[in-house]
Image (cartoon, helix red, strand yellow):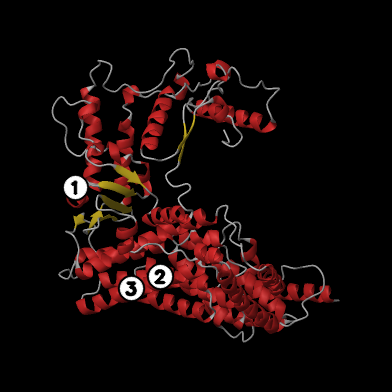
Amino acid sequence: DQLKAAKNAKSGTESKVSKARGLGSGLRGVFGGKPSTSTPSATVGVVSDISSDVKGPFNAYRETVIYTTYELGMGRVEYLKGNLDEAKKHFQNVLDATVGGLPLVGKLGQTRRYRTAARTSLGDVAFRKGQYAEAAKFYDAAAKGAREDNRLDLMWPAQRGTGKSLWSQAASEKDQKKAARLREESLTSYRQALDTIEAVREGSLRADEARTSFLATTEDVFKEASSALAEMALAGPSSAAPGTSNAPATTPPLEGQALDYAAEALSVIERGRARSLLDMLSESGAEITEGVPADLLRQKQENQKRQQEIAALMTGVNLGGEGPKKSLEELQAELDQLQNDYDSIENQIRSASPRYAALTASKPLTLEDIRQQVLDDDTALLEYTLGDERSYLFAVTRAGLTLSRLPGRAQIEQQAMAFRQQIIPATLRRSLTDLVSASAEPQRGLTLSGGGTAADPAAVSAYAGVANALYKTVIEPAAPLFKNSRLLVVADGALNYVPFQALVAAAPPAGADFSTLPYLLKTNDTLFAPSASVVAAIRQQRASSGGSNAGGMLIVADPVFNASDARARGAKTVAQQTDGEAARGLSFDSALADVSDSEKPNGAPAATGAQRGVLVRLAGTRTEAQQIAKFATAAGRKADVWLSTTSCTSPRTGF
């Protein structure tokens, strides 16, 4: 009888929706991308009819969830297609359905969340239309709703939206006092968004949230906030409209309020860049539950399981067994209490496990922390952040900080690509399939200007031109500050693939060859790091380990690529190999074949046998590894060098 009643209720509801709104056809058209033809004014009445006609509030709630999910999804589709008016209709339908005459359904968690998402989405539409004041109102309402529901995962997008709306509104405001107030309010909203993101990251996650996807969607918040702060620092007290210029600019060593803005911008960049990497480094292979009572861990697991069960009951996902024995209000109250209990359990776990607390609450560095914990008197930090319209370079020493506005990401990427293409001149490039025989050339490498052969002047000139152009864009603005210091480079985007040491600091003299170019490495030692905070974290880990592994390094060089290599004669036959060893060999052969085939024209047959490329021995890397080991030993550091065939094929190497 219950199943029959549910079917009848569903049939009646679908009939009413089809007649009044065309919702049935809309749902059937989701995968076809057909938009709803409903109007915002009809939404409340239809959903109210559903609520009154369906036997029981559960079905009303589920039908509302289905409808709002569809409308919200279609709105995002239209938004991404650039159809802002159509997108606005869908989002307004969601908002009208969730704030209308539904005294029960409108108070439930999922409905409240859709209401917040609709307001944020309407703010997105208004922002895209340049209606910044209206956008800010929608974002504020969304943030307020998320705050009341304690939904941090929905709060930070709204706070970020308020920040960007107020910043854009200030740029077009003629009243300078009002513009200054809007900019400060924008910064406040960005700071709130960043704090909310940190609160989510620290562990207060609900059963329906995913930390991985959350972290993957917050990068823009850090970039926008740091850009706004950087523009405030670059503008200085004399500028009336920070953030309205994309022209390159560099400050002298900053002081006063400008320094405060720049320091905060750098800290925000560190927070965004270091956060996910610090989490991965800290949690990979770490037993974070060490010292935590088993009862707490059991409570946490049971709490999450029950949250998921309630969510399934409320939305009708759990189709088997008896129906819910509690009302919607009772289930929602239980869910709210479970979420509060979950936060309490997390706090208890942090208190019981100092290691867990350290992993989840590690703090990225401030400007003063960077100077004291990362830099010395002879080292300068060059930290980059690339943006669509403008990029920034923070140059930091113990004595000062300069800030440079650089071109947008596209121009820097273009220069970086041009530089990389000239690292190996076109006349000296060889594809993998050209190396068809190890006997044809027992060594491989480049002889750019040695061996008694003069370098091609055109190749030298082409290389020097692009290398100097990139140097002028990304290094030269900070050169007066760092001079001959060691450089610690924290790159971003395409700059991660640029060997900074090979950049050319000045135009070469006539007749110069590759060996006489004024490379950056001739004046500045250059090191690279994913962030300054990671450098400090690694140093702290070494210090906490008592220095047992401090300064150690592993060097793997001169690998065996081919069975014909003399060093492989003592290797096992195919029959003698373990399954793991055989699998590694097949994987290497497959990868080599893929590269060889990828260099063939479209439609050409796959390479087989001798047609495939042969990776020739890198004997020069053996010499390099041995020299590195000597330097390390002389400096009192331990170097573990793997060169022998047995080392290279050891199970612990994974080769």
What residue is rendered at 24% in x and 39% in y? 520
How far apart, in angstroms, are the residues tagged by discs 3 and 1?
Answer: 37 Å
Location of mark 2 (residue)? 161
Which corner quadrant holds the N terminus? Answer: bottom right
Q: Nearer the viewer, mark 3 or mark 1?
A: 1
The amino acid sitting under disc 1 is: Lys
Q: Is residue 610 left or right of residue 412?
A: right
Between 485 and 192, the one lying in front of the other is: 485
What residue is rendered at 55% in x and 82% in y? 99
Q: Nearer the viewer, mark 1 or mark 2?
A: 1
The reply to whether callout 3 and callout 1 are in contact (CB within 8 Å) is no
Q: Is residue 76 left or right of residue 300?
A: left
Location of mark 3 (residue)? 186
Q: Position of residue 621 (x, y in %)?
A: 42, 27
Location of mark 1 (residue)? 483
The amino acid sitting under disc 2 is: Gly
Q: Position of residue 49 (x, y in %)?
A: 66, 82
Q: Is residue 583 left or right of residue 159?
A: right
Q: Position of residue 635 (x, y in %)?
A: 36, 39
